[in-house]
Amino acid sequence: MRDNKRINAEIKLACQVYGANHVLWAPDGSWIKISVFPLPPNLNMKITEIIIIFPEQYGYGAPLRDCFVNPDLKAWNPKTNQLVELPHYYQQYPYTKPPIGSKEEFVRKQWRYLCIHEKNWHPQKSNIVTFLQYVNFFLSDPLRDWKSLFESYETRKR
C-alpha cells in the first residue's frame, strides 16, 4: 500500500518544479507523467515525456526506480560520432505488470522502459525530484560503465 499523503505532496512538488500544466497523475497514485522533462545536451532531444511508477510500498521504504521515456531517445557517442540507443534502456517492462495499462498499451504508445537504481535513496529525504535528478544524471553520460562504478563504490564502502 502506497503512502497517498506523501504521493500527493510529491505531485504538488512536481507541479511546482515542472509546471502544473505539464504534470498528470493516476487518481490511485500509481504513476505520474511529466510532459516536458528537460534532457542534457548530449541527447537527440531537448525534452521528453516521462512516466514514473510509484511502487506499491512507496512512502514505506520502497524507492522510485521504474520510468518510461520516449522510444526515440538516443545519446551521442563521441567514439563513433553517431547517435546510439541508451544502454540499460530496456524495451521490456518492469518486474510486475505496469499499473497504468497493459504491455500491449505501452507497445502501442511506443513507451520504453528505463530503470534507475538510486544508490543513495533515503526514504525520508529522497523524492520524485531527487529521483528525476538521478535520471538526468544518468542520461548526461549514459555510455559510462555505471555497473563498475557502483561495484567499486560498494567495495570501498565496506
Image: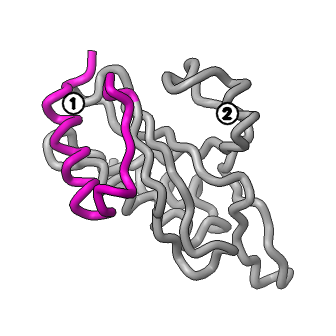
Which quadrant of the view contains residue 25? Answer: top left
- Circle 1 Cα neighbour tier, 10 Å, few/some/many (<14 / 14–19 / ≥20): many
Numbered badge on residue 59: 1
Residue 136, position as x, y percentages in the image: 46, 65
Measure the C-alpha gap from mark 2 to mark 1: 26 Å
Residue 126 position within the rendered picture, expressed as x and y whole percent measured from the top left: 23, 49
Give the residue furthest to the top: 1
Residue closest to the eye, 111 or 117: 111
Q: Relative to 157, is 116 on the left or the right?
A: right
> Relative to residue 77, is residue 55 drawn left or right?
left
Q: Is residue 27 magenta?
A: yes
Verify whether residue 78 appears in magenta: no
Which of the image's four quarters has the N terminus? top left
105 versus 78 height, above or below: above
Main secondary structure along the magenta-highlighted residues: helix
Secondary structure found at label 1: loop
* Mark sitting earlier along the chain (2/1): 1
Q: Nearer the viewer, mark 2 or mark 1?
A: 2
Depth check, front residue: 107 or 121 = 107
